[in-house]
Image (cartoon, grey):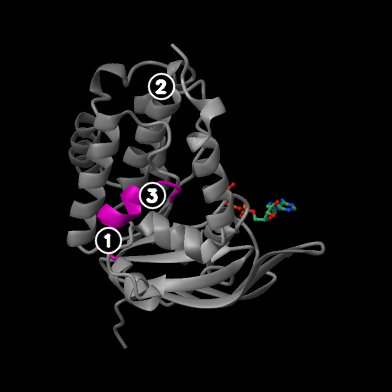
Amino acid sequence: MLTDVRIQLNQISKEYGTTKAVKPFNLEVKKGELFCFLGPNGSGKTTTIKMMTGLLEPTDGTVLISGINMWTSPLEAKKLIAYVPDQPKLYPKLTGQEFLQFTASIYQISEQEFEERSTKYVSMFQLDQRLDELIEAYSHGMKQKLSLCAALLHQPDVLFLDEPTVGLDPQGAKTMKNLLQALCQNGMTVFMSTHILEIAEQMCDRVGIIKNGDLLTVGTVDDLRKQKGSMDSSLEDLFLELTGDTEAQSLVREMEDSPSSEVRR
Ligand SMILES: Nc1ncnc2c1ncn2[C@@H]1O[C@H](COP(=O)(O)OP(=O)(O)OP(=O)(O)O)[C@@H](O)[C@H]1O
């Protein structure tokens, strides 16, 4: 039976010794959806993404990508996805061009498809002039852009991104935003984690908020506003309320307001 569910998590969980990094939860993300995973530091975002991409074995539960079990059929499932981590580890002694060719050969992409797709993405991120340089000479942002270009070469069903805009300049972040929205309109599913609530608010179809390994809520930003009964709230207010960080936030505000923090001329 054909299904438009691209990511299906069934009671997935992860324990590191006695640390319950991710507590069991279910989640479905559909074809063409741009889903944002939000949570404070150490809440379990990277651990969840690593389980979804087959890099980490869940303690319990299953991950299905377009109906294929990531842990029991990893080769089949991994053909359908791409993952851009927050700190891409690329081969420093390859040039950007060699890295793209290497990635294309792993996914057995034809030469014509490689030319078309790599030219398109590389020029979008203005990497064309730097492709013949060794990756070790690239900045963090350039590595992220190259990693994204490589991830898109095989046109995955699902693209996973961990903190994609950290390290990108404003132009790069805008290009990334526009590109991700266009890819989703063409049927790709994007699952990304971010700390930047403005990005989540502007781009995402739905958000999931995780804290201490618990998936607290999932929905559109408007759903969250309705849940909280405050239609004027920003996602930042809702996030702070849900993750219980209001106390820390008001402390920061108090410090900002106190006379001792005023700028003296
Ligand atoms: N390899 C590991 N061994 C033991 N504990 C780990 C390991 N990796 C992560 N953890 C713990 O699991 C919990 C979730 O970590 P995770 O990296 O998934 O959080 P995160 O939401 O991605 O955080 P951040 O926003 O800071 O990147 C944390 O308590 C972390 O210390």
**Amino acid at pointer 2:** Thr
Residue at point 49%, 43% (across, down): 253
- Where is residue 211? Give x, y as percent: 58, 63
Looking at the image, the residue that sits furthest to the bottom is 1
Q: Which residue is mark 1?
A: 188
Q: Which residue is mark 2?
A: 95
Between residues 67 and 112, which one lies in front from this camera angle?
Answer: 67
User: Where 95 falls versus 229 (above or below)?
Assistant: above
User: Where 209 falls versus 131 (above or below)?
Assistant: below
**Magenta residues, as a range?**
194-205
Kindly check if marks 1 and 2 are in contact, taking CB atoms under 8 A apart as contact.
no
Give the class, few, some or many, for how many residues have Cα within 10 Å of label 2's Cα (few <14, many ≥20).
Answer: some
Q: Nearer the viewer, mark 3 or mark 2?
A: 2
Q: Is residue 111 left or right of residue 27?
A: left
Q: Looking at the image, can residue 191 be seen?
A: no
Between residues 234 and 111, which one lies in front from this camera angle?
Answer: 234
Dot 2 lies on which element?
Answer: loop
**CA distance for labels 3 and 1:** 17 Å
Is 188 within the magenta?
no
